[in-house]
Amino acid sequence: MQAGKILLKGCWCLWLFSRSIIVKLKRFVMNNRRKFLQHLTGGIVALPFLSLHSLAATETEATGTLLQPSPEQPYAGPVLRVAIMGLGGYGTMVAEAMRACKKAKLVGVISGTPAKIDAWQTRYHIPEKNCYNYENFDKIKDNPDIDAVYVITPNALHKEQVIRVAKAGKHVICEKPMALNAKEGQEMVDACKKAGVKLLVGYRMHFEPKTLEIIRLRKAGELGKIKFFEGLSGFAIGDPNQWRLNKALAGGGAMMDIGIYSVNGARYMTGEEPVWVTAEETKTDPVKFKEGVDETIQFQFGFPSGAVASCLSTYSMNFLDKFFLVGTNGFGELQPATGYGPIQGKTHKGPLSALHVTHQTVQMEEMSDIILQNKTPVVPVDGEEGLKDLKIIDAIYLAARTGKKIML
Ligand code: NAD
């Protein structure tokens, strides 16, 4: 009896001991695997800029599909090798966000400032052979180590730069607004088509999880028949001498820079293309906002379904970043709707819970798939999409100038 008890106790201890060994072993393997994977991807991904865990979680929650491999799996697919043209404020933001990308890598720069090139070479380990200036970047056609150029310069330069990149046989990502007007935009689309390269526009919100969740609900019919969209896009602009307030470089004012978010948002939130536009412009500071540089424009759209939109674009008010979509059965709201995040959102069912992800990181991961693997995004980001916004902006300016309802 006593011997049996001792034997039972012995077995129990042995089981506990072996279990703790197994747990420790498992932990060791997991930890070292993670280290190994970090080491493996080290060339592509510098220190994780955002948690890949949260990235994967967000995507699963928001879209129901995992866009990224889990952090436990090394990425072995194709990598989009990108050169950034224009090393200013937003170019820097994109470069920093790309540190966390697996599917896209910053490998080159195009700039008119040698000191900036030096600094970027050091920070992002960019080889000399991948550095260009605005005069010689056509030579990029002879560089097999660059797949795409991301144009992040003032608006008025986009057309010529994109066409030159296309002629050099490289894919192009162009910042918004894609061009100054629809005529220019059409030339860019045509040039890229002719050259057989892809043209994408830096519409980062098209990959934002809370935005995509409202689009998913709308498509699933959960909001009922869509009736109304409200878009508020604006901020109080500072320095009166910046290029954004120079018609020749910006192509306009607030509408080209920030109002475009409401134009674009009205389309992806409702899922429709406007058939008419009305607009009214107001100017409180004609010194800062010179002829051709719009300070504030209110604009309205009518859609084929009968739904309508009412939007505000301004360079003279802060706290204006809101989208509101309402249908017969519910609503979706984003506020802030288009800032760098975190985006906040709710619907008639309650708050949206998808975690914040760095917009430009996800954008570049997705654009890699679009360019290299022909992936179709939920909301298009191609040149045709940029062109649609430009046609509407042309109509808004015409409506504001003439006071007439413009049919599209
Ligand atoms: P910025 O002024 O910070 O940078 C512009 C860069 O272009 C600078 O490095 C400048 O040296 C260079 N440049 C080249 N030629 C120039 C010229 N002739 N005049 C002036 N600068 C010249 O501007 P930014 O904020 O980086 O904006 C660049 C583009 O990115 C714009 O089209 C803007 O609309 C877009 N942007 C997009 C987002 C977004 O969230 N998607 C955010 C900010 C800016």
Image (cartoon, helix red, strand yellow):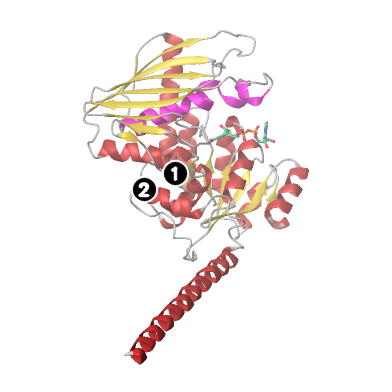
Based on the displayed image, in which of its 4 quarters is residue 291 positioned?
top right
Residue indicated by mark 2 = 61
In the picture, which quadrant includes the C terminus? top left
Q: Amino acid at mark 1?
A: Leu
Residue 309: % across, % down: 34, 21
Which residue, as the protein is rendered here, is positioned at the far right? 115
Q: Is residue 1 magenta?
A: no
Magenta region, residue range? 242-270
Q: Residue at x 32, y 25 (%)?
A: 274
Camera-nearest residue between 406 and 56: 56
Secondary structure mostly seen in the magenta stretch: helix
Mark earlier in primary sequence (1, 2):
2
Report, in whole angstroms, how far the alpha carbon at label 1 lies from the one at label 2: 9 Å
Vertical comparison of 293 with 183: above or below: above
Work out whether residue 196 can be spotted: no
Vertical comparison of 68 with 33: above or below: above
Residue indicated by mark 1 = 355
Work out whether residue 111 can be spotted: yes
Residue 398: % across, % down: 44, 16
Q: Amino acid at mark 2?
A: Glu
Based on the displayed image, in which of its 4 quarters is residue 248 positioned?
top right
**Marks 1 & 2, CB-CB < 8 Å contact:** yes
Taking 70 as reference, is 326 left or right? left
Camera-nearest residue between 358 and 197: 358
Vertical comparison of 147 with 345: above or below: below
Q: Residue at x 31, y 30 (%)?
A: 270
Badge 1 density bin: few <14, some 14–19, many ≥20, Cα 10 Å: some
Q: Quadrant of ligand 1?
A: top right
Residue at disc 2, secondary structure:
helix
Q: Residue at x 71, y 51 (%)?
A: 123
